[in-house]
Amino acid sequence: MTGGTLMPDFADAAYRQAFRHTSSHILAHAVKRLFPETRLAIGPAIEDGFYYDFDREEPFTPDDLKKIEDEMKRIVKADLPLERFELPRAEARQLMLDKTESYKVELIDELPEDAVISFYRQEDFTDLCAGPHLEHTGQVRAFKLTQVAGAYWRGSEKNKMLQRIYGTSFPDKDQLRDYLQKLEEARKRDHNKLGRELGFFTTTEYIGQGLPIMLPKGARALQLLQRFVEDEEEKRGYLLTKTPLMAKSDLYKISGHWYHYRDSMFIMGDPEKADTEEVLALRPMACPFQFQAYLTRTRSYRDLPIRYAETSTLFRNESSGEMHGLIRLRQFTISEGHIVCAPDQLEREFRASLDLAAFMLQTIGLDEDVSYRFSTWDPENREKFIGSAEQWDAVQATMKNILDHMGIDYAHGFGEAAFYGPKLDIQIRNVFGKEDTLITIQIDFQLAERFEMFYTDRDGSRRHPIIIHRTSIGCYERTLALLIEKYAGALPLWMAPEQVRVLPISERHLEAAGQLADQLRQAGLRVTVDDRDEKIGKKIREGQMDKLQYMLIMGDQEVDQGTISVRSRLDGDLGVMPVDSLIERLRTEVAQKRNKV
RNA sequence: GCCGCUGUGGCUCAGAGGUAGAGCAGCUCACUCGUAAUGAGCAGGCCGUGAGUUCGAUUCUCACCAGCGGCUCCA
């Protein structure tokens, strides 16, 4: 390896990064050979591969990708050495100017004064690069270009959109093949495909983007999740509210949404006339509504904390390219709650909120799949946030303190805070590896003041409470999406829309099957009967494809003996058992909310 | 919103400048069946929507709608 001393061990992250980084240079080299007019932007290694951003008038077609891959193969086969060299700033700049690489010139100009400016050269291809790299292009034995996508220069939509070519690479063909195969397997779990196939949800062009129809299976699953969340919150001292889905612009003006969030709001009427006429808007968040509940009477420190919870449906006018399956929607429902508390209660309530979230994740089986992100403001971007720097610094320090006390291992989300305060986001990756926020817990030190929310303290003084905005299970639709992916559509029994299906072997067992179904329903189970005139093999096959956890076979033997033959999705034929034992078994599994993958 | 790809019966997909096929699903009939597909027959499509090019378009062009992968934004 040049510019480093790492052993060629692909399991080592640093080596892997150099490997992928060299791969991106090979990609850029091939592109420059085939399309010399292309300008180079940047080309880093990423988690499972690499990309390179190019500026070229013509879009790269799938055909071009093949040609580029072939050219890359030639570069690999030539086993070109990568040479590192350094240049003083002026010469470095001139080199890139000579090559008309304007993006590289821009990068050089922004390097700090004392930066070492290094380049890597393979044959006639030279790229500004800190390295490190592999020694020869021949080491990249297996690679594949996976897709082309648009990406803004320096990640800002104000800049030109470049073309990004993604690829992945490995030391040998077997590893590449395994990786691509795993990717293929993962895609079979894609909730957006599986969820539709299994009949959880659908969309229609007449209703619109980001507005799914929850079909009976999906609706039932959501209902089960909601009941669970609402019951658990009640146990933990939350008070239920049910607030309107819309309000006058006046409410959002106080909260600041009107000024910080308006582009994402559905507004009925002319927003320009909001100062003189009644203009209603669908709510993008329920916080100001619950604050109105708090304001119905004077509050004492003895009343605090007050924990409000609501299964709240929200509306956000997302841009067209942002909607995705059940992950990003224009109308969605979250387990929203606001805890109004005194400063000395903050840590305890924050911990309790996180404990509740952790309990939820554990119960639905996603606890192993999440990561934490501490999202703070960006002092350079004052338009996006309200409040003073002193306030932000203070509350962020408080929050960091709490998180560190709790020993939470978090990443830092710079500039990712809500406009009114910092957050702890619980992040999860979907089947494509894309990260989204599942749960969020936010500390708000602004809105109580704006809404003139007070409590009377021990000494008789009026103080503003602090507010924790939190979700306990997050957005229900998003959670369902991740559950479908996690369990490949086979939801744990307690939240399965159809828990058991009775399969009569022939027509003469229909009556007994119906009676069994009734008996199971009496025991609180969700049961159907496959009463079609089909062979048992076919019914079982379709039951497996429907991802049923349990199928019950009813034939002569069972009718005679008063037993039932049980087939479980995971363990196959469990043999016959008395109906009472079956009911006991299923009820226990439901009561324990058991998760099996 | 931006870049790219896609859009043929419920689903998976063929197809070609002269107005459409297969498998599965559905329906009917026969079979009454023991742990992942019984057989035969029938029916089902303004080829996403609108405009343009053309003697003629589902096939070519454009716009819109919807779906997908990114970017930006975000629960």
Image: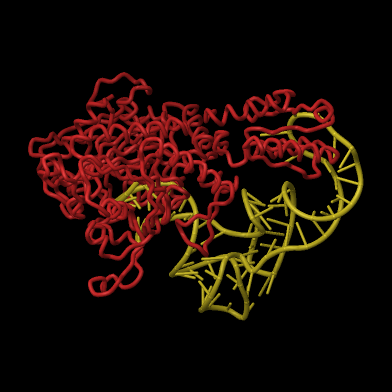
Chain colours: A red, B yellow
Residue B38, given in percent of the width and then of the height, sits at 82, 41
For the image, the number of numbered tags is: 0
Residue A266, given in percent of the width and then of the height, sits at 36, 63
Going by the image, does A375 lie left or right of A93?
A: right
Going by the image, does A430 lie left or right of A549?
A: left
Q: Is residue A438 visible?
A: yes
Going by the image, does A285 lie left or right of A489?
A: left
Residue sitting at x 44%, y 52%: A61
Vertical placement of residue A158 versus A446, above or below: below
Q: Report the front residue among A321 and A341.
A: A341
Q: Report the front residue among A287 and A487.
A: A287
Which image quadrant for residue A272? bottom left
Given the current orientation, which residue lies at the most extreme top position? A7
In the rendered image, the quadrant that contains the N terminus of chain A is: top left
Residue A52, given in percent of the width and then of the height, sits at 33, 43
Residue A41, given in percent of the width and then of the height, sits at 27, 47
